Image (spheres, helix red, strand yellow):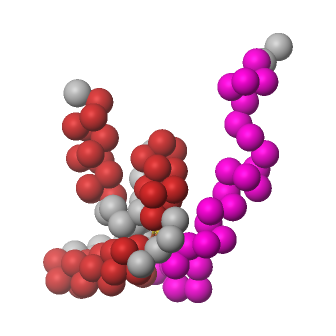
């Protein structure tokens, strides 16, 4: 039988922080790159997303979720996919 001390908490408690996200009413393509996006277009989109994240009251919760859950795509907590990968490589060394 699983130990109740290590089971995740109720779903709504785990995800309530998302209701406070500054991106809640922003189109998701601001945070997720389209197929083949590169160069200046990608840099501009990422900068725009990061500016929204910088104003977000749940940036820490969002970033922690993305790092703990291993979110592969998108900007979470003000970090790009590449930034999260580099950070996780650093802390796992
Ligand atoms: S930190 Fe960024 S991606 Fe996360 S909830 Fe806030 S605005 Fe959205």
Q: Is residue 43 left or right of residue 17?
A: left
Q: Farthest top residue?
A: 1
Give x and y (percent) for residue 24: 59, 79
As for residue 57 lying within the magenta part, the answer is no
Give x and y (percent) for residue 75: 39, 66
Q: Is residue 38 visible?
A: yes
Write the start and end of the magenta stretch as one range.
3-29
Q: Is residue 75 left or right of residue 47?
A: right
Q: Is residue 4 left or right of residue 42?
A: right
Q: Which image quadrant is residue 21 in?
A: bottom right
For the point 45% across and 64% down, the residue is 59
Location of the N terminus (image quadrant): top right
As for residue 4 lying within the magenta part, the answer is yes
For the point 52% across and 78% down, the residue is 22
Q: Is residue 76 visible?
A: no
Give x and y (percent) for residue 33: 37, 73
């Amino acid at each position: 039988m699983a130990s109740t001390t290590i089971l995740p908490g109720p779903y709504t408690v785990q995800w309530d922080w998302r209701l406070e996200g500054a991106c809640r009413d922003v189109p998701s393509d601001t945070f997720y790159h389209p197929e083949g996006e590169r160069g200046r277009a990608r840099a501009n989109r990422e900068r725009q997303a990061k500016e929204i994240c910088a104003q977000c009251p749940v940036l820490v919760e969002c970033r922690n979720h993305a790092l703990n859950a291993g979110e592969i795509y998108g900007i979470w907590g003000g970090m790009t996919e590449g930034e999260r990968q580099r950070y996780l490589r650093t802390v796992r060394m």
